[in-house]
Amino acid sequence: MSKNTTDTYWMKKALSLAMKGTGTVSPNPRVGCVIVNRFNEIIGTGFHQAYGGPHAEIIAIRSLKEAADGATMYLTLEPCTIHGKTPACAPVVCDLGLSRAVIGSIDPNPQVAGRGVQMLKDSGVDVTMGVGTKEANWLIRSFKKFITTGLPYVTVKVAQSLDGGIASSTGVSKWISSEESRKEVHALRGEVDAVLVGKQTALIDNPQLTVRELKGRNPLRFVFDRNLTLPHYLHIFTDSEHSKTIVCCAPSMKNSEKAKELAKLGVRVLPVPIDKKGNFKIIEFLGILSDQFFVSHLLVEGGGAVVSAFAQAACIDEFQLFVAPFLFGAPKSMATLPVALSPDEASKYSIVEHKKSGADLHIIAVKTDSGKEFSERMF
Ligand code: AOF
Ligand code: ZN
């Protein structure tokens, strides 16, 4: 194997290890590490497993079967140089006597931002960058937004028909997409910290918003219901996860009878500022999510009014779009309120992935300025 092929092979392994931290490390990044000796044999592995716990490289170092001098470390994110909940990793890595380090991403945390790589270089380690970088960037996309802006990364999931309808003329939108697509959506729920739906979606679809088709932890469930009019028989209020349901209401409803009834059911009520038209202020809502609930990645699951509100506030970082090959004929599209008056003013997104998902087409698009960080991923 050439050096390039070997690097790609081991970095791919480090990336799969990093994935194992999905759902448990947020809002910290998912990070994986593989240490390989001079005979190209694996001698240590690790991944960041829990928020506040030891970092990937420390776990890999603890697992070492032999001394790591002369070895190569494959690390999806550069080692940190700060003492946070755990001591800085870079000095520990420098002490190993590695001959090489292959690093996926530069840490977007402004307190690190390249200093880990510099420390390795200064201690004589030969550092290679650019292997698996797009994949590594993808793994930490929500961490990057959270650590640089203090706001959660917003993914909007939409299942729609060929003619752009998210619901039929009768308003029904449940089961619009194939079984495979639903599995993908459940995987997404396992990856994010919170999901959000609007009142109409909660009422008409009565969704559970849990991870069921595969293993994963359930996200918090937020629902927009300004006047707390949703009926209490809904799954989100009655199932075993109801303590993870948070109903967002107008501040004036905070101490209402309806709020007290929900509290009795064990469901939390969250007052969110509203604008002059009576709509929730989306940026303020996102601030509350990160400050009070530690949410670094939010999945908006519809419907049209909520997606429109996020689109108007220019708060959508990513679309996960499932296009089902049928025609509704009475399309209610995902964004029903005006967002742009001309193509020039439209928010621009780049497609970073497109694939068949059962009978559907699954498209992932991100804001154009971050598109180049992830596009044409190699695995
Ligand atoms: C992680 N896991 O494997 C790496 C991280 O508070 P701490 O000590 O957990 O440090 C968090 C910072 O460490 C985080 O903001 C990021 O910059 C850096 N790298 N974090 O949680 C890891 N390598
Ligand atoms: Zn660290």
Image (tube, grey):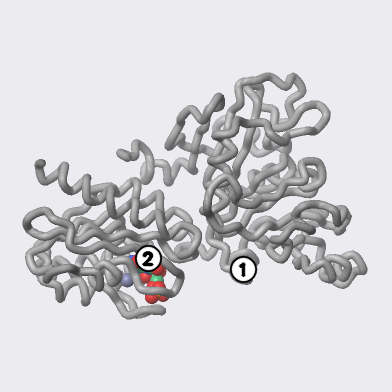
Answer whether labels 2 and 1 touch (C-beta < 8 Å). Answer: no
Residue under pointer 1: 293
Residue 273 placement: quadrant:
bottom right
Q: Secondary structure at mark 2?
A: loop
Q: Residues within 10 Å of mark 1 (few under 14, many from 20)?
A: few
Q: Is residue 270 visible?
A: yes
Q: Is residue 81 left or right of residue 282?
A: left
Q: Position of residue 240 (x, y in %)?
A: 71, 61
Q: Is mark 2 within 8 Å of ligand 1?
A: yes
Q: Nearer the viewer, mark 2 or mark 1?
A: 2
Figure quarter occupied by ligand 2: bottom left
Which numbered marker is on residue 48?
2
Residue at image coords 24%, 57%: 103
Count all numbered tags in the image, as a single digit: 2
Q: Is residue 318 left or right of residue 172?
A: left
Q: Is residue 127 visible?
A: no
Asked if residue 139 is positioned above or below residue 27 in the image, the reply reads above
Q: Secondary structure at mark 1?
A: helix
Q: Quadrant of the C terminus?
A: top left
What's the amino acid at mark 2?
His
Q: Position of residue 53 (x, y in %)?
A: 40, 74
Q: Position of residue 129 (x, y in %)?
A: 21, 53
Which numbered marker is on residue 215?
none
Residue at image coords 38%, 43%: 374
Q: Residues within 10 Å of mark 2 (few under 14, many from 20)?
A: many
Residue at image coords 14%, 66%: 121
What's the amino acid at mark 1?
Phe
Q: Is residue 229 left or right of residue 333?
A: right
Tell which of 216 and 355 is nearer to you. Answer: 216
Q: Quadrant of the N terminus?
A: top left
